[in-house]
């Protein structure tokens, strides 16, 4: 029964993409270009996609979501004004450990539960935690870079899994792109069956050196949320979902960690708030060993 409900829900989403989306030649929107997913995404999609596209997979202990924050520099953004710890996280993400807490709006919790239970679990993608303690045991954070033959980083893969359940929280592909309605943005592609959820986030440096990434715009070509469906023969069906807005506020804390508040809204109504505490991975490993020594009998 759950599988049947999931298939019906996926069909409804595809119908909405057809109803509200526009048919576009893939070559005319390079700023939206990205892979489309199979029926299940899981943990290995980025590697199979890299093999099909002839990309090299680079692994290592020191890889960042962005090779250099200066890729976002323009008249509206100056990466040199970023706080050192915020910039270091984006350029050396694999050196950090993340803890996350979630808070859903009571109004949207039933819809979120249904979407995740029937659709996200089925496609093994976008399994956002529904309860604050769901990720109490932590989550993995695996970074890999996908390079073309010239050595250019085409995408950076960020795979996060719930340590308690093993479920993929999300598998995202990060890069930068310049949509027609703005300067360089952070681009995140979340492959889903027959398409992707692609988010373009415009960067803003705050007075204290913190960073805001904002997916908000007014029309097609602006930063925001795009639901992309593969239309075949080099064509895409693209739905610019203007009511969905996201804000990430990444800021340094007084204890030396980096914090992130992630707000998701629909028509201005709060849907989900995720809070991240980001610490150097070495500190987390040392703390874990210390805790183990305390609780183990002597």
Image (cartoon, rainbow, N blue to C red):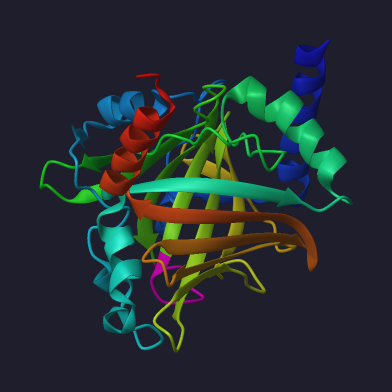
**Which residue is at a point 28% across and 32% down the rendered structure image?**
53
**Which residue is at a point 47% across and 67% down the rendered structure image?**
250
Q: Is residue 243 magenta?
A: no
Quarter the C terminus occupies: top left
Quarter the N terminus occupies: top right
Of residue 272 and residue 229, the one placed in the foreground of this image is 272
Residue 61 at x, y percent in the picture = 19, 41
Residue 148 at x, y percent in the picture = 18, 42
Tell me if I can see residue 128 in this picture. yes
**Toward which corner of the image does residue 84 lie, by quadrant?**
bottom left
Residue 243 at x, y percent in the picture = 75, 62
Of residue 213 and residue 199, the one placed in the foreground of this image is 213
**Toward which corner of the image does residue 231 lie, by quadrant?**
top right
Left or right of 273: which side holds 194? left
Left or right of 271: which side holds 161? left
**Which residue is at a point 52% across and 30% down the rendered structure image?**
162
Residue 48 at x, y percent in the picture = 34, 23
Give the answer, above or below, for where 168 lies relative to 109.
above
**Which residue is at a point 31% across and 38% down the rendered structure image?**
285
The prevailing secondary structure element of the residues shown in magenta is loop
Q: Which residues are magenta?
A: 178-185
């Amino acid at each position: 029964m759950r599988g049947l409900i999931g298939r019906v829900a996926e069909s409804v989403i595809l119908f909405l993409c057809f109803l509200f989306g526009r048919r576009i030649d893939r070559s005319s929107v390079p700023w939206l270009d990205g892979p489309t997913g199979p029926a299940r995404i899981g943990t290995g999609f980025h590697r199979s996609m890299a093999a099909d596209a002839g990309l090299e997979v680079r692994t290592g202990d020191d890889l960042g979501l962005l090779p250099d924050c200066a890729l976002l520099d323009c008249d509206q953004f100056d990466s040199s004004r970023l706080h050192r710890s915020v910039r270091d996280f984006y350029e050396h993400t694999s050196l950090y450990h993340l803890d996350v807490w979630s808070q859903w709006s009571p109004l949207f919790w039933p819809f979120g539960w249904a979407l995740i239970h029937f659709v996200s679990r089925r496609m093994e993608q976008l399994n956002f935690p529904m309860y604050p303690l769901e990720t109490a045991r932590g989550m993995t954070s695996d970074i890999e870079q996908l390079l073309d033959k010239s050595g250019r980083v085409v995408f950076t893969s960020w795979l996060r899994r719930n340590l308690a359940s093993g479920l993929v929280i999300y598998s995202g592909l990060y890069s930068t792109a310049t949509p027609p309605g703005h300067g360089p943005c952070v681009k995140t592609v979340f492959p889903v069956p027959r398409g992707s959820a692609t988010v373009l986030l415009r960067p803003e440096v705050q007075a204290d050196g913190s960073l805001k990434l904002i997916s908000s715009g007014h029309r097609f070509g602006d930063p925001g949320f795009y639901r992309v469906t593969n239309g075949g023969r080099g064509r895409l069906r693209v739905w610019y979902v203007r009511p969905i807005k996201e804000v990430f506020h990444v800021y340094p804390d007084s204890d030396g960690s980096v914090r992130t508040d992630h707000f998701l809204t629909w028509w201005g109504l709060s849907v989900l708030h995720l809070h991240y505490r980001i610490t150097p991975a070495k500190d987390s490993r040392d703390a874990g060993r210390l805790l183990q020594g305390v609780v183990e009998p002597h």
